[in-house]
């Protein structure tokens, strides 16, 4: 039998455990992996399980683009991969809105940075990122 609820979160502030960024950093040029969103966690907060990450973008695929790959990484474009969509089949000049989720069980706070990257395979021109969301929940 589950334990009955004895506390509620009515007066508990969880604001520092939920972070988001909606700023487009850049759009992927040709076939290079590019940071499209970035989020830094500067507070020193206790991590019990890890950091749940979620990423989303709305992107118009550039000329000759045939695949789209999203990754959630620590630090920068060469940082540890937290999650990877692998190559998704796309068509040039079409709009896509993929998402990606992952949990970073190796996070170290404070000052942990996460990035959402996009890479368009076979791309001959810049793809256009219209909107992004990179979110982190510290669990």
Image (cartoon, grey):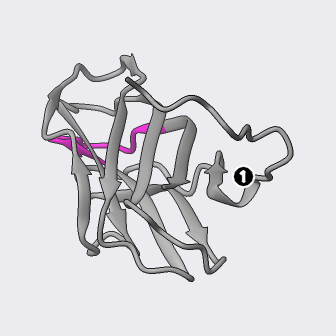
81 to the left or right of 58? left
126 part of magenta stretch: yes
Q: Is residue 22 above or below residue 107?
A: above
Give how far across and how far down residue 59 sits, in percent.
Answer: 44, 31
116 to the left or right of 43? left
Local packing at callout 1 (Cα closer than 10 Å; few below 14, some 14-19, many 20+) is few
Which quadrant of the structure image shows residue 105?
bottom left
Q: Is residue 58 above or below residue 20?
A: above
Which quadrant of the structure image shows residue 125?
top left
Give how far across and how far down residue 42 sits, in percent.
Answer: 64, 78
Q: Nearer the viewer, residue 95 or 102?
A: 102
Q: Nearer the viewer, residue 35 or 116?
A: 116
Residue at point 36%, 17% (across, down): 94
- Residue on which the image places disc 1: 14
Quadrant in which the N terminus appears: top left
Name the residue at the front extreme.
1
Q: Nearer the viewer, residue 4 or 136?
A: 4
Residue at point 17%, 33% (across, down): 67
Give how far across and how far down residue 10 sits, in percent.
Answer: 82, 38
Give how far across and how far down residue 96 sits, in percent.
Answer: 38, 21
Q: Start and end of the magenta stretch?
A: 118-128
Residue at point 22%, 32% (across, down): 65
Say what secondary structure mark 1 lies in.
loop
52 part of magenta stretch: no
115 to the left or right of 82? right
Which quadrant of the structure image shows residue 87?
top left
Q: Nearer the viewer, residue 65 or 53?
A: 53
42 to the left or right of 1? right
């Amino acid at each position: 039998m589950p334990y009955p609820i004895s506390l509620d979160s009515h007066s508990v502030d969880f604001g520092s455990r939920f972070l988001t960024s909606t700023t487009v950093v850049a759009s992927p040029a040709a076939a290079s992996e590019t940071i499209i969103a970035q989020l830094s966690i500067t507070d020193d907060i206790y991590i019990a399980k890890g950091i749940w990450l979620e990423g989303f973008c709305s992107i118009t695929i550039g000329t000759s683009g045939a695949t789209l790959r999203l990754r959630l990484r620590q630090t920068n474009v060469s940082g540890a991969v937290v999650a990877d969509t692998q190559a998704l089949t796309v068509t040039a000049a079409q709009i896509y809105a993929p998402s990606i989720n992952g949990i970073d069980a190796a996070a170290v706070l404070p000052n942990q940075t996460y990035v959402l990257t996009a890479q368009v395979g076979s791309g001959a021109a810049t793809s256009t990122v219209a909107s992004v969301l990179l979110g982190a929940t510290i669990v």
